[in-house]
Amino acid sequence: MSLLALEDVNAGYGRTPVLHDISMDIQEGEIVSLIGRNGAGKSTLMKTIIGLLSPTSGEISFRGEAVTDDPAERRARRGIGYVPQDKEIFPRLTVHENLKVGRLVNERSDEELFEEMYDYFPILDERRQQRAGTMSGGEQQMLAIARALVGAPDLLLLDEPSEGVQPTIVEEISDAVKEINDDIGTTIFFVEQHLEFTINTTERCYVIETGEIVNELPPDELRDSEVVQQHITV
Amino acid sequence: MAVVEELFRFLVLMLSFFGTLALAGIGLAIIFGIMGIINFAHGEFIMIGAYSTSMAYQFGLPLIAAIGVGGLATGVFGLVVERLLIRHMYDRLIDTLVATWGLSLILTQVVRIQFGGSFAGVPVPFGTFQYGGFSASMYKIVLGFAAIALFALAYVILMYTDYGLQARAAMQNKDMARSLGVQTDRVYMLTFFFGSVLSGVAGGLFAPLTVLTPSMGSDYIVKAFVTVIVGGANVIVGTSGAALSLGFIQTPASQIFGTLGGRVALLVTTILIIRILPEGISGVVTRD
Amino acid sequence: MSRETTASDSTEKGDPTGQSGNTRRRFLKSVAVSTGAVSIAGCTGQFGGGGGAEPIKIGTLYDNSGPMGFVGKGKDAATKMWLEEQNHTLLDREVEWIDYNPAGDNTKYKNLTRKLIQQDDVDMIFGALLSSNREALRPIVDENKQLFSYNGWYEGGVCDEFMVLNTTLTSQQRPLIDFMVENFGSDYYALVADYNYGRVSNRYARHYAQENGAEPVGEEFIPLEVSEFGSTINRIKEEDPDWILSLLVGSSQLSFFKQAESAGVDLPYGSLANIAGTYEHVKFEPPVMSDTYSCFSYFQEIPTERNRQFVQKFQENNPDYTKENGGYVFLSIADAWNAIRFYWKAVEKAGTVDQQEVLAAYEDGLELESPKGTITFNGETHHATQNMWLAKVNDDHSITFLDQGGNETDQPIAENVQTSEWFRNQCNLVEDSTWDDPKTEYLTPDEGDLA
């Protein structure tokens, strides 16, 4: 069944259009990625899906229901989790409080899931009472993912999860994403520039160029340097 | 003996300066800190608190209950203002500034038309505190402790309730909070209510010490702004720290140079602190 | 009740010419009056018109809103009551009342003054509450040669051909200071509202105190919006004065009395600002104002039959001013009442509303039986001469009137009190000023001028 569907979505900032007629479809249980150059519209697409930007035209539906007019908080409550590009953890809240914000807005979430997150990310367990703003980039990334997951979303949106993270931790995050998908069955959609991460994690990959989806590839093709040349490298 | 008297004189005066500044500032600080909205009608909210406290007191309630009524009435009024006016202007600082300034003029005039130039007061309770040759109004001491209690209450609400957590999250990153399902509109509405209740309680606490007039708010808004500016972004620690340090300066200054000297010292200190610490006291207590 | 004042340049002192010059001018003035009257009569045909003529027009400019709104409303109510008593008739002519609300805004004061003079073409204007209001419109009045009654109580100093005025506070001070020094002692602590009214009045107070061998042991100038008096109270206790001179005004500053009471300050207050005009003894719960001694030309409680009838009638017409409704028939009401009655007297005496002739009638001297007692109009200074009453606020906030020795009395403490001697030496509008060559000054004494 289609979990998230976009149909001819146009969106942008103010009067500047960024996305042009985006159509895509994500099935329940999939891990799907989207690659593209800087400024191609990756983050804009993410914001449009979570609802921080309103499309100027087109339809977005989630679990078969139209959510185009829902504000972000309602989409979140419907089961979309969002991890933005610069993590955007709450710096002056503790790790534990950050997770609580993610959890307390979803009635479906329970205490067990909360502790489960500490199991997935043991480093967070150690730092429960630490101010989130004082942690490293990788730790903040884990916190941002955990924070989205305690809301027990059906769909998790990750905006460049490997950005600003040490190479050793990138692999850890990739494993965690797959584990989450396997264990809990959370559908995952992420955008990336990091090829290794994308190839290792994803099942299906969209390619975006200047606001338009130009291709859909199996990740293996990303090993082909010609394809990479064409779509990613500047 | 004389030293102890002198100490009492200093402490009681400081407690009363601290209490006045802290109470005047708390409601403004909460609304500004969490919502980023400057409520120019803040002084009039204090006035409404004082008036409704006095009404409840004249009706026969004991003072402490009357102050509760004053806080609640101001809170409900704040809720109406938020729904009708403020919520249409989130993220538009200048618009809210102008709108609330207009509101303050309207409120002053409406109260003047309805109740005249002054309003029945509340007598000062608790009598006189006496130690040797030193005596002071007991209520001023109570006022200082009431300010501390109110800050403690606000701290508990912000730190240990679901509302408080959501408010702090929305304050640090509104879009992210929304993306996690926090209904920021509701949080802001509650925040405006909460800030209004605190302003109303402050007005109720001030009522016995002042003359109730429609324009009494204009006195408190100066104190509130000075405290909030010196305090900076941190609602609880910044604001109470500002009230404490300004009170600490104002006390000897007004003792030596008189009331006028105390006020000059207050404003000079404010300017100096803003020059040295652009983020106010909050810049010292939070570094991240 | 006068507040901030934009003092106009007033260095110019009286006419330097000698006695003979004054006499000559006085002669010229009376000639000017009669010729002026004739020429106006010739132009308009109104002179001595009798019944059926155009209505007499009077204008009032009393704030009905804003911080001073309650004062202006009281003055309008007094004006209305008088006009109704007179059946809106003067010299057999109908009196039309044009009532504007300047709302405490000096720009409106100016515009409405112009409108009254140029569009409505009024015969007389009553108005302005604060000194700043009056100083804003005075140049317009002078330029248009418009007779104007400023009947607020103020710090004194207006010496203007076209203005007729009420008593001044400086004249109240001598009996009060004499009384306080005699009954309580020579060490006093002065609390002064930090603006023109406070500072000028304090200058007079210190002068009269020195004459009595008294001295302020402390003096504090307090900004108008201050409402926190902890340090002031501490300082008063340290100085331990015999009494406190209160020149505190405005609602914020009145908080002092509540705070002093609860801090255990038990000193008599000599007040040149409270009770008569702002009725704190009605507004506050007893005993906050107890032991306050206030000296003014009028209190609602003045124990004469004439005053009792006036108060009764005024309160019947205006129930807002009864004690049950938290109101009080305050000084400014009696002042507005007397101001319009003085005008009536002057017009009846002149037999015309021609402004120059009416002014001549004023300057010739007028006498009035009023709720305040007998008051007269002094032609030289254009100010009223009246009795001063010394009211003591008792523990239950009732009022007792006292004489100089501190005994209860039903008489004023001082009779026929004029403007200060210094002012009378500076200002003689009969001798030094004419309609065509008018004196329009605002005189305030500098430090040392009084001695």
Image: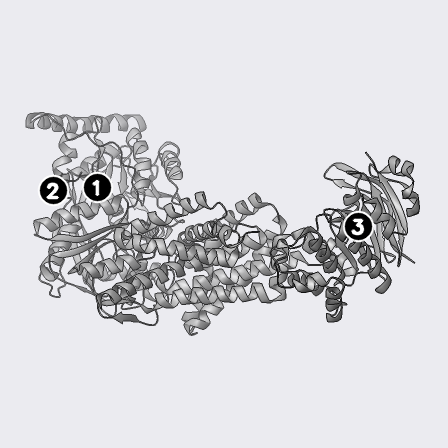
Could you say where residue A133 lies in the image, as x and y percent from the top left?
62, 54
Residue nearer the viewer, A175 or B264: A175
Res C191 label: none
Above or below: residue B14 compared with residue C138: below
Quarter of the view holding residue B178: bottom right
Q: Is residue C4 visible?
A: yes
How far is mark 2 from mark 1, CA to CA? 26 Å
Q: Are marks 3 and 2 in contact (CB under 8 Å)?
A: no
Name the residue type under label 1. Answer: Ala
Could you say where residue B113 lies in the image, as x and y percent from the top left?
44, 55
Above or below: residue C2 compared with residue B78: above
Instruction: Tell me which chain the residue with mark 1 is part of.
Output: C
Q: Are marks 3 and 1 on the same chain?
A: no
Instruction: Tell me which chain the residue with mark 3 is part of.
Output: A
Between disc 2 and disc 1, the foreground one is: 2
Q: Are marks 3 and 1 in contact (CB under 8 Å)?
A: no
A91 with respect to C127 (left or right): right
Name the residue type under label 2. Answer: Glu
Q: Are marks 2 and 1 in contact (CB under 8 Å)?
A: no
Residue nearer the viewer, B71 or C154: B71
Res C421 label: 2
How far is mark 3 from mark 2, CA to CA? 86 Å
Quick one: SS at disc 2? Answer: helix
Query: Which quadrant of the rendered structure holds the C terminus of chain C?
Result: top left
Query: Residue at the location (49% across, 66% down)?
Result: B152
Residue nearer the viewer, A101 or C428: A101
- The residue to which callout 1 is attached is C346
A175 with respect to C397 (left or right): right
- The residue to which callout 3 is attached is A49
Mark nearer the N terminus (2 vs 1): 1
Between disc 3 and disc 1, the foreground one is: 3
Residue nearer the viewer, A217 or C447: A217
